[in-house]
Image (spheres, grey):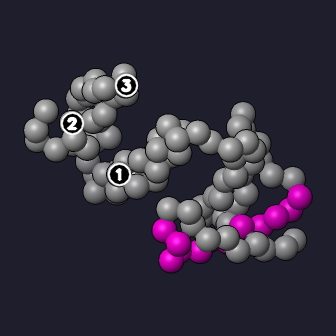
Amino acid sequence: MPTVKVTSIIDASRCYEYVDNGVPKQGGVKDVYFSPDRKYVVAFFRTPLDFNQKDRIRRIVTLYLDNIKKGMPLITSCRTFTGGHMMPWSAMGKQG
């Protein structure tokens, strides 16, 4: 099965490989492939994402993932701000 190398859209200095067996695992909106060692997955959305969807994914794979790795809770409390979005206090800093 061919291995494909792709560049991260979050950090262009990082590359990931996945095994393209021609039959990806599928969720409701994306196709998912395993890495050669099966330690991570690479996912492709089937349709383009809007700004809010991209922003949500970016937060998940940066801020929230970093907090999980540090052992910090994802959300200690939330506050609504303009636009009706919920943000964790830790993401907003101490002001607010």
Tell me which label, 3 or 1, sits earlier in the chain. 1
Say which residue label 1 marks: 63
Residue 21 belongs to magenta span: yes
Say which residue label 2 marks: 89
Horizontal side of 86 relative to 55 (left or right) equals left
* Residue 22 coordinates in the image, percent (x, y): 89, 58
Tell me which label, 2 or 1, sits earlier in the chain. 1
Position of the C terminus, as image quadrant, is top left
Secondary structure under badge 2? helix
* Residue 24 coordinates in the image, percent (x, y): 80, 52
Comparing 2 with 93, the one in front is: 93
At label 3, counting other C-alpha atoms closer than 10 Å, the crowd grade (few under 14, some 14-19, many 20 or more) is: few
Which residue shows up at 52% across the image and 41% down it? 51
Q: CA distance from mark 3 to mark 1?
A: 20 Å
Residue farthest bottom in this picture: 13
Secondary structure under badge 3? loop
The image quarter containing residue 78 is top left
Secondary structure under badge 1? helix
Say which residue label 3 marks: 83
Position of the N terminus, as image quadrant, is bottom right
Is residue 17 shown above or below 61? below
The magenta segment is 11-22
Instruction: Identify which amino acid the numbered label 2 is placed on.
Output: Trp
* Residue 70 coordinates in the image, percent (x, y): 28, 57
Instruction: Identify which amino acid the numbered label 1 is placed on.
Output: Leu
Residue 5 belongs to magenta span: no
Horizontal side of 81 relative to 30 (left or right) equals left
Horizontal side of 16 relative to 93 (left or right) equals right
Instruction: Identify which amino acid the numbered label 3 is placed on.
Output: Gly
Which residue shows up at 34% across the image and 56% down it? 66
Q: CA distance from mark 2 to mark 1?
A: 12 Å
